[in-house]
């Protein structure tokens, strides 16, 4: 019991595979995804600071590193399913938050419970740190999808994943989004000319939505 249980539970994130049920050339665990999200968010936050935005770095690292901890209890549910309806999304979030709360209550020492409740909370909100988390999370979907498409994977789900992530990112009002669209996305498209699908056209259509 105690903190040992929490540390031990982190191993489970290495065994939960993202986008289950579809053929993939490269499997991605939730643990690997979380690490990449932290790296993306760090650079995105640097871009925000360069534009005069104040960043709460402690909050940013807490919410990005722990944003998918709840998947230990419910697994990785595909984005189209998770967001099928607001009601379903709300129910899934309620279950996830309830399981996390129960885990903290049963396993975390009393003097640390408030800290864990803060660190393992839902971090996507209207704050700059919450918005950066949202961009970083979707940015990893872009890279996971484009990597599969570049390798010749013709599963339609990766086209949808790429397109939907771009639509979500472009509608978030941050300086780092403008930087991504102007300086990073063109490189992604440029390196995708040999894909079995037309990434350039899909990208244009997504940005026009």
Image (spheres, grey):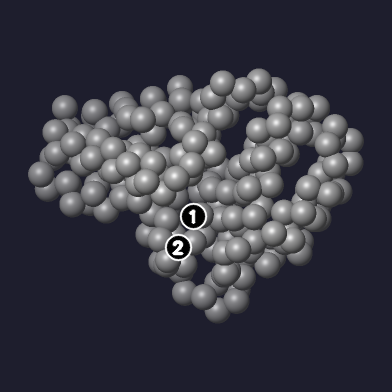
Inspect this view and state whether residue 89 appears.
Answer: yes
Mark 2, secondary structure of its residue: helix
Circle number at residue 87: none
Residue shown at 84%/49% (left/top)? Answer: 200
Residue placed under numbered mark 2 in the picture = 129
Residue 92 image position (x, y, % from top left): 35, 39
Outermost residue to the left: 110
**In the displayed structure image, the side of residue 89 where residue 7 appears, left or right:** left
Residue 158 occupies quadrant:
top right
| Quadrant into which the C terminus falls | bottom right
Q: Is residue 21 above or below residue 4?
A: above
174 relative position to 76: left or right: right
Position above or below: 1 against 52? above
Q: Which mark is residue 133?
A: 1
Q: Residue furthest right?
A: 194
Q: Residue at x 64, y 61 (%)?
A: 170
Residue 127 in the image: state x and y as whole percent. 42, 67
Q: Do residues under tags 2 and 1 come within 8 Å of each other at their CB atoms?
A: yes
- Please name the residue shown 55% across and 72% down the image: 49
Sort mark 2 into few (<14), some (14-19) or many (20+) by Cα contacts within 10 Å. many
- Which residue: 48% across, 44% down? 83
Judging depth in this view, the residue of 177 and 78 nearest the camera is 78
Q: Position of residue 23 (x, y in %)?
A: 66, 20
């Amino acid at each position: 019991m105690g903190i040992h249980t929490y540390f031990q539970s982190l191993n489970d994130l290495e065994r939960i595979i993202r986008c289950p049920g579809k053929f993939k050339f490269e499997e991605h665990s939730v643990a690997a995804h979380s690490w990449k999200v932290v790296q993306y968010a760090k650079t995105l936050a640097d871009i925000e600071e360069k534009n005069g935005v104040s960043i709460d770095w402690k909050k940013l690292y807490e919410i990005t590193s722990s944003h998918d901890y709840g998947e230990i209890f419910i697994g990785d549910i595909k984005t189209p399913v998770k967001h099928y309806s607001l009601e379903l999304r709300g129910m899934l979030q309620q279950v996830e938050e309830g399981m996390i709360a129960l885990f903290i209550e049963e396993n975390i020492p009393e003097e640390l419970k408030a800290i864990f409740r803060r660190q393992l909370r839902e971090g996507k909100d209207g704050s700059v740190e919450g918005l950066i988390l949202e961009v970083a999370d979707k940015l990893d979907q872009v890279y996971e999808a484009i990597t599969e498409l570049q390798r010749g994977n013709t599963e339609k789900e990766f086209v949808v994943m790429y397109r939907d992530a771009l639509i979500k990112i472009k509608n978030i009002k941050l300086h780092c989004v403008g930087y991504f669209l102007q300086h990073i996305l063109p490189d992604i498209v440029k390196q995708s000319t040999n894909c079995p699908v037309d990434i350039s056209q899909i990208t244009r259509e997504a940005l026009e939505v």
